[in-house]
């Protein structure tokens, strides 16, 4: 692992959220603090903190940015609504992005450095093998670092 990278397993962070689909409705809660403020999460299937398959939905407000990061496992992303702008690399470079809209599918390989931007209110579904972990390429981008000194 490179120096300065923040890693987190989401088991403890997601434990208080019982967001499993019940009766066709999703129960949304705030996304764990590893995500920049403003995102919401709903767990559809499995346990993101466990070792098996899981499926979650993430809702982002317009203009939401997830800085460059990567995961130790493959991530399969489906856009449910809105516009999901994404790119590969170690910096958010809006000139080197792809755009996905509702129904489009984005496979992201393990350890690929990537970033994302929501255009309009956007919901994505993520399917992956747990435990889910997120490592920021630049430790300063970790939203938990900003609150650690408070």
Image (spheres, helix red, strand yellow):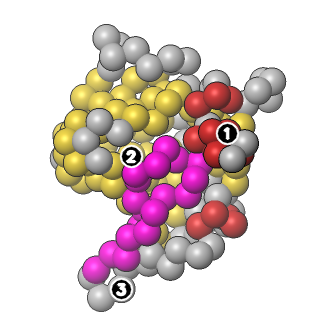
Numbered disc in front, either 2 or 1: 1
Which residue in the structure is indicated by mark 3? Answer: 22
The residue nearer to you, when weighing 32 against 73, is 32
Kindly identify the residue that appears in the image at 33 percent across and 75 percent down.
26
Query: Which element type, helix, strand or loop, lies under badge 2?
Result: strand
Q: Which mark is residue 60?
A: none
Query: Which element type, helix, strand or loop, lies under badge 1?
Result: helix
Label 3: how many Cα within 10 Å (few below 14, some 14–19, many 20+): few
Up the image or down, 54 lies above or below 149; here it is below
User: x, y percentage for residue 121?
Assistant: 22, 48
Q: Is residue 121 visible?
A: yes
The residue nearer to you, when weighing 107 against 83, is 83
CA gap, disc 3 to disc 1?
35 Å
Query: Which element type, helix, strand or loop, lies under badge 3?
Result: loop
Q: Give the side of residue 137 with respect to residue 101, left or right.
A: right
Kindly identify the residue that appears in the image at 33 percent across and 16 percent down.
94
Q: Give the side of residue 107 with respect to residue 14, left or right.
A: left
- Per the picture, the main secondary structure of the magenta-coloured stretch is loop
Decide which of tag 3 and tag 1 comes sooner along the chain. 3
Which residue in the structure is indicated by mark 1? Answer: 145
User: x, y percentage for residue 36?
Assistant: 49, 44
User: x, y percentage for residue 42?
Assistant: 41, 67
Which residue in the structure is indicated by mark 2? Answer: 77
Decide which of tag 2 and tag 1 comes sooner along the chain. 2
For the N terminus, the image quarter is top right
| Segment colored magenta | 25-42
Whether the magenta-drawn stretch holds residue 61 is answered as no
Kindly identify the residue that appears in the image at 64 percent across and 45 percent down.
147
The residue nearer to you, when weighing 78 against 41, is 41
């Amino acid at each position: 692992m490179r120096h300065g990278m923040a890693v987190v397993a989401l088991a403890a962070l997601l434990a208080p959220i019982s967001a499993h689909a019940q009766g066709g409705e999703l129960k949304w809660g705030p996304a764990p603090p590893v995500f920049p403020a403003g995102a919401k999460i709903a767990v559809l299937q499995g346990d993101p903190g466990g070792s098996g398959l899981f499926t979650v939905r993430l809702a982002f407000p317009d203009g939401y940015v997830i800085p460059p990061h990567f995961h130790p496992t493959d991530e399969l992303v489906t856009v449910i609504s809105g516009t999901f702008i994404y790119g590969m690399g170690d910096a958010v470079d809006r000139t080197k992005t792809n755009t996905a809209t509702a129904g489009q599918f984005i496979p992201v390989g393990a350890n690929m450095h990537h970033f994302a931007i929501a255009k309009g209110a956007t919901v994505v579904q993520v399917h992956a093998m747990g435990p889910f972990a997120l490592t920021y390429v630049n430790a300063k981008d970790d939203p938990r670092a900003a609150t650690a000194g408070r």
